[in-house]
Amino acid sequence: MVLGNISSDEDLAVLEAMREHEHEIVREQAAWAIARMAERFAVS
């Protein structure tokens, strides 16, 4: 969740990898963070 709020574009690779994690909650949080980053960077 933190990466979605304060991340930079360098963190995107980590989040993309986490989308394949074995635990659903990790996958969901990674997807949320990626979406949040997209919103933040689109506005910036």
Image: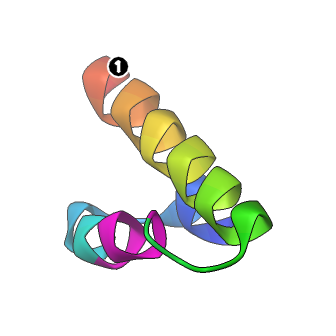
Of 29 and 1, the residue lying toward us: 29
Residue 25: percent from the left, percent from the top?
78, 64
Which image quadrant: the C terminus?
Answer: top left
Residue 5: percent from the left, percent from the top?
62, 54
Task: Tell me the residue at 53%/37% (across/down).
Answer: 36
Which image quadrant: the N terminus?
Answer: bottom right
Task: Tell me the residue at 55%/67% (across/down).
Answer: 3
Q: Which residue is mark 1?
A: 43
The verdict on residue 16 being magenta is yes
Q: Is residue 41 above or below residue 8?
A: above
Q: Main secondary structure of the magenta part?
A: helix
Q: Is residue 15 left or right of residue 22?
A: left
Asked if residue 36 shows in the view, the reply is: yes
Task: Tell me the residue at 30%/34% (across/down).
Answer: 41
| Residue that lies at the very extreme toward the top in this rendered image | 43
Magenta stretch, residue numbers: 14-19
Residue 22: percent from the left, percent from the top?
61, 80
Q: At label 1, which amino acid type do we have?
A: Val
The verdict on residue 17 being magenta is yes
Of 41 and 16, the residue lying toward us: 16
Q: Is residue 13 above or below residue 32?
A: below
Residue 21: percent from the left, percent from the top?
53, 77
Asked if residue 1 shows in the view, the reply is: no
Question: Badge 1: few (under 14), some or many (20 or more) residues near its Cα, within 10 Å?
Answer: few
